[in-house]
Image (tube, rainbow, N blue to C red):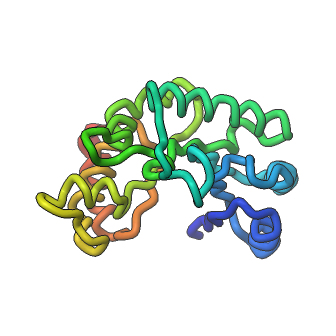
Amino acid sequence: SIPISIDTYKYEVAKKALETGADMINDISALRNDEKIADLVSNYDVPICLMHMKGTPRDMQKNPFYKDVVMEIKSFLNERINYAISKGIKKNNIIIDPGIGFGKRTGAGVEDNCEILRRLKEFKELGQPILIGVSRKTFIGNICGEEKQLPVDQRLEGSLAAMCIAVMNGADIVRMHDVLESKRCLRLIDKVIKKA
């Protein structure tokens, strides 16, 4: 069967989803919005994805600043991993996501998302599987649109390129909108990486 992941940072949504058979929780707040989710995940013994986001969904893009985006995200994720473990979540049930597009600088000569993709292997030091969601993100529209940002429905090639870069640099799980096209790219990458 296909695993079902619920993207929520709200306890009631997570509870109802797990009660009705969801297989994992993807929490963009990394257990900061509602700490009761940690107990829920621990009790159900399911995986959780802890994502980095600077700020909240309302203010995450209001002047985010980093001295070293990768080091700061690694430090945040390490702290959240330790917190999750302290709440009874098994280490092997924790997945990390550096949060491409969530409180990251894009445009004006600074591209945090590209830096994260370029240095993704550094997150392996945390010892957890890495999930990346790059599909149709704003930074792809900014970079691939030669004179103006590409609309969302024209970001397929950039999304696939970013996904391939992420996998080649250590991503274990990818979240994509265009499943068939992504699967075809991943089959080729698997062949190259595994030399099978």
* Image spot of residue 51 (x, y percent): 59, 47
Task: Name which quarter of the figure residue 140 lies in.
Answer: bottom left
Quadrant location of the N terminus in the rendered image: bottom right
State the residue in front, 190 or 119: 119
54 over 5 or under it: above or below: above
Which residue is the extreme one toward the left? Answer: 146
193 over 79 or under it: above or below: below
* Image spot of residue 188 (x, y percent): 24, 52
24 sits left or right of 66 in the view = right
| Residue drawn at x 75%, y 71% as measured from the top left | 17
25 over 189 or under it: above or below: below
132 over 71 or under it: above or below: below
State the residue in front, 112 or 99: 112
Q: How many marks?
A: 0
Quadrant location of the C terminus in the rendered image: top left
| Residue drawn at x 63%, y 57% as measured from the top left | 26
State the residue in front, 7 or 73: 73
| Residue drawn at x 27%, y 62% as measured from the top left | 184
State the residue in front, 5 or 99: 99
* Image spot of residue 98 (x, y percent): 51, 42
| Residue drawn at x 28%, y 67% as measured from the top left | 181
